[in-house]
Each structure stands twice: as structure tokens, then as C-alpha cells.
Image: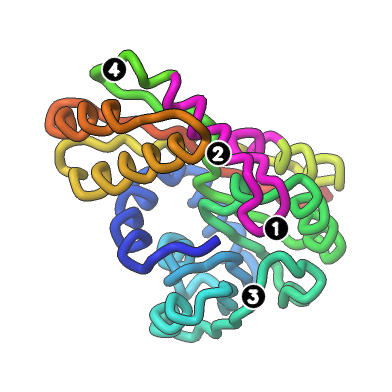
């Protein structure tokens, strides 16, 4: 499970626009009330989550397995980077953190991994901000007859093992909320869909290509669908569903 810096840069503006603003403000307000807070961002990439919350909101540790992405993230002021495999939860540098964050990660993870991470977070009563977890919805303002078949195939592909166990894909958001809730956490959730129009043509083109490749790997030929969708980039608004979550100990 690894993503290029070019892809992460392409999607960051859409991610920032999609994050639920009220939930993000709750995170910032909660951190501001802490004295010298420390936070750990898992699967950090180049640091988009830290930039969204605000680099000065906490002392950040950014964790990723991709050294090249971490090299870019190291430009964030007063942050440190750690190269690590997220699969090894017991080795993740979470001790002492008051907040754990991750974006566009949990839909790539399995139930056992989510439960084990929830145990570590709850063990020290840290907060959790999990943004942009894919929820299985893909819609276009101009429909295509193959949209449903391609979406079903893509969602099936999402449940393959991405390195963190058999991924939950669209079921990850509810599973994460349940995992935190049963550990005594109060969970707030909100939708954070991408809404991509003609101004997002480069991102849409990359996204559509990735969807078609995933559908093909899941057994559905999406070549014709991809050609038609690329031809509609200038006129069809694309909505990709996500959910944001902020969980804190109830007491």
C-alpha cells in the first residue's frame, strides 16, 4: 500500500474541501485546550492531515512506510517523521500522544487491524480523528449505464488485502465507529464527499483511470465506461462518498 507524491498532491485540495468543517473545528478546539499537545498522524504521506488541522496545533509525529513521502513531510515545522510499517501496531509510536489522526486510510484496513489500533488508542485515552474514509458511494450528475456495475466491482476490489489485513472497504467507517464506541468513546461522524467538476479535470482523469483498473482487476471490463466518462469530465459532476470521524473518551 503506497501512493505517489504526485497523486497525493493532486488530491489534497479536494480532500481539504471535502473535510467536514465543523468536525475539523472540533479537533482544533480540543487540541487548543490541551497544554503542549502531541499528535501522531498514521499513513501521513507528505503531511496533508497536519496541514489541514494546522502544523502549530500540536507537536506532530508523522508515520509512513514511504521514505520519499516522509522526506517531503519533513518540511513541516516542528514535526518529526518516522518510517514504519503500519501493520505492526504494537511498534507504532503512539505512547504519550493525545491525538491519533489518519486520512483516507481506514477503508484500506482490516477489522483485526482496526480493533487492535482502537485498543492502543483507548489504552491511553487518546482522541482519534479519522478523515476521508471511503463509504462506497460513487455518483455522477450525468449517468452512464455501467456506473453501477463498475462501482460494485471497485468496491469489491477495495476489500482485498492492502497490507493491513483483508480490507473492510466501504464498511470501514461504521466498523471504526463501533470499535471506538465499545471502548467507551463518544463518536462524532459527518460526511465528507468529494464533489469534482470541470475544474478538477486532472484529478478526475487519474481517479477514473484508477477506478477502471480496479474494476478490471475485480473482473469487470471498464474500458468502454472509462472512455465515456473521460468524455464527460467537462459536464458531469463526480461525487465520491467519504466519512469523517472524531472520537474522544466519554469521560
Please report whichever mark, 1 or 3, sits nearer to the chain's N-terminal start: 3
Please name the residue that numbered disc 1 is placed on. 127
Q: Residues within 10 Å of mark 2 (few under 14, many from 20)?
A: many
Please name the residue that numbered disc 2 is placed on. 157
Report helix, strand or loop for mark 4.
loop
Residues at circles 4 and 2 in contact by the CB criterion of under 8 Å:
no
Q: Residues within 10 Å of mark 1 (few under 14, many from 20)?
A: many
Magenta run includes residue 148 = no
Please name the residue that numbered disc 3 is placed on. 38
Q: CA distance from mark 4 to mark 2?
A: 20 Å
The residues colored magenta run 149-174
Please report whichever mark, 2 or 1, sits nearer to the chain's N-terminal start: 1
Q: Residue at x 30, y 23 (%)?
A: 140
Q: Residues within 10 Å of mark 3 (few under 14, many from 20)?
A: some
The one nearer the camera, 84 or 129, is 84
In the image, taking residue 188 as reference, residue 114 lies left or right, namely: right
Dominant SS type (magenta): helix
Q: Nearer the viewer, mark 3 or mark 2?
A: 2
Residues at circles 1 and 3 in contact by the CB criterion of under 8 Å:
no
Amino acid at each position: 500500500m503506497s501512493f505517489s507524491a504526485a497523486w497525493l498532491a493532486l488530491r489534497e485540495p479536494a480532500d481539504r474541501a471535502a473535510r467536514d468543517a465543523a468536525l475539523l473545528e472540533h479537533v482544533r478546539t480540543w487540541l487548543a485546550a490541551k497544554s503542549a499537545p502531541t499528535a501522531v498522524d498514521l499513513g501521513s504521506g507528505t503531511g496533508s492531515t497536519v496541514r489541514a488541522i494546522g502544523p502549530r496545533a500540536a507537536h506532530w509525529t508523522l508515520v509512513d512506510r514511504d521514505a520519499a513521502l516522509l522526506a517531503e513531510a519533513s518540511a513541516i515545522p516542528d514535526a518529526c517523521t518516522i518510517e514504519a510499517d503500519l501493520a505492526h501496531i504494537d511498534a507504532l509510536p503512539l505512547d504519550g500522544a493525545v491525538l491519533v489522526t489518519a486520512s483516507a486510510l481506514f477503508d484500506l484496513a482490516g477489522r483485526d487491524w482496526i480493533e487492535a489500533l482502537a485498543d492502543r488508542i483507548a489504552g491511553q485515552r487518546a482522541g482519534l480523528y479519522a478523515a476521508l474514509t471511503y463509504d462506497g458511494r460513487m455518483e455522477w450528475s450525468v449517468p452512464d449505464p455501467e456506473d453501477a456495475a463498475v462501482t460494485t466491482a471497485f468496491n469489491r476490489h477495495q476489500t482485498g488485502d492492502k497490507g493491513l489485513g483483508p480490507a473492510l472497504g466501504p464498511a470501514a467507517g461504521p466498523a471504526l465507529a463501533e470499535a471506538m464506541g465499545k471502548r467507551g468513546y463518544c463518536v462524532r461522524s459527518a460526511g465528507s464527499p468529494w464533489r469534482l467538476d470541470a475544474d478538477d479535470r486532472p484529478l478526475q482523469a487519474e481517479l477514473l483511470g484508477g477506478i477502471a483498473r480496479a474494476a478490471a482487476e475485480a473482473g469487470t471490463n471498464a474500458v468502454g465506461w472509462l472512455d465515456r466518462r473521460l468524455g464527460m469530465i467537462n459536464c458531469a459532476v463526480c461525487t465520491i462518498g467519504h466519512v469523517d470521524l472524531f472520537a474522544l473518551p466519554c469521560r
